Image (cartoon, rainbow, N blue to C red):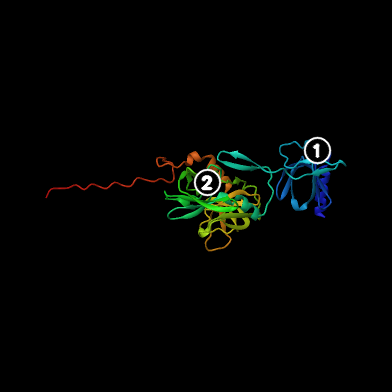
Amino acid sequence: MRKAWFVALLVLGCRVFAKGADTVQLKSQGAVIGTILAEKRDAVVMDLGYTVLVIPRNQISTISRDTTDVARASRKASVRVSPDAALVVEPAPPATEARSGLYAVATGSSPVKNVRELVEQLGQAVVQVKTPSALGSGFFINEDGFLLTNFHVIEGETQISVEVYHQKAGQLERKTYKQVRIVAINKFEDIALMKIEDKDAPKFVKVRFGSADALAVGERVFAIGSPMGLERTVTEGILSTKTRQLQGALYLQTTTQINPGNSGGPLFNLTGDVVGITNMKITFGEGLGFAIPIESVKFFLDHRDAYAYANDNPSNPFRYLEPPSRTKQAVTPE
């Protein structure tokens, strides 16, 4: 009874929008009429004039849009008029990307794909980061060789190499690059930006950034990395929570298996966009992995000059100091 009353109230309250408005047909035979503000994976947001309503996808039967307002920039799907003048919702246009400094950000809506397709598409962008005392993962953020990893993977190291798998003629070819420069680091966020500077380096396959804020708890995610040195390992799980507080910072918690060697690798959603950097797990439990939200990574990259790596930078959280000189002993005559 309460549900029927609620739907009736919505229909009654929205009649003022009947002309030149969007219509969401509910599975309960009711309808909501207003202006669609946003379409998310699990809900549709509508402006009813006096309030904004969030309608779960599992309660929606069909969506019809007003043809007089199709050109609004906020629209993510196109509407055409069929020969019988009925409104037909067409699929959203292909996702595009916008360049923001060193990295690309997804714009528009992206189609959901299976993990196999996405690994084939993005696997070359994920690398293995090696130092004399550690091993981790990383990923390219642009074609020019800029890549991200965790700070703790390269902490205290000056000899860094990156192993990349290039796909040629349907085969994967391993290539090791040893001219790697540290560009910027943030010890407290556990992020490091590096660049491959080998003279024979080609253009690299890059990833695209998504949004951790847009993720829903329970949404499927997957990681690619080198756990225990096993390169190109793929693990899949769900997002457990977006706001797990650990040591004063917020992390994405996931059931995706994270092990030593995954550190610094990307956490993807099912549209192929990076939503976080995997960096730790709870060792005495299973399915308790954590990732740095991509919003924190974007802030680090947008303000990388403040985190620029240099020995003479007094604000640098990680500096190599000159070794102490030997104390000259005074020689006294006997």
Q: Quadrant of residue 115?
A: bottom right
Q: Quadrant of residue 298?
A: top right
- Residue at screen point 69% across, 48% down: 111
* Disc 1: which residue: 67
Q: Nearer the viewer, mark 1 or mark 2?
A: 2
Indicate the position of residue 229 as horizontal and vertical percent values.
50, 58
User: From mark 1 to mark 2, how far is it between C-alphas?
Assistant: 44 Å
Residue 217 in sight from this viewpoint: no
Between 14 and 189, the one nearer to me in the picture: 189
Between 317 and 33, the one nearer to me in the picture: 317
- Residue at screen point 52% across, 61% down: 283
| SS category of the residue bearing label 2 | strand
Indicate the position of residue 220 as horizontal and vertical percent values.
65, 55
Residue 147: mark: 2
Q: Looking at the picture, which amino acid does disc 2 mark?
A: Leu
Between 305 and 53, the one nearer to me in the picture: 305
Residue 216: mark: none
Residue 204 in sight from this viewpoint: yes
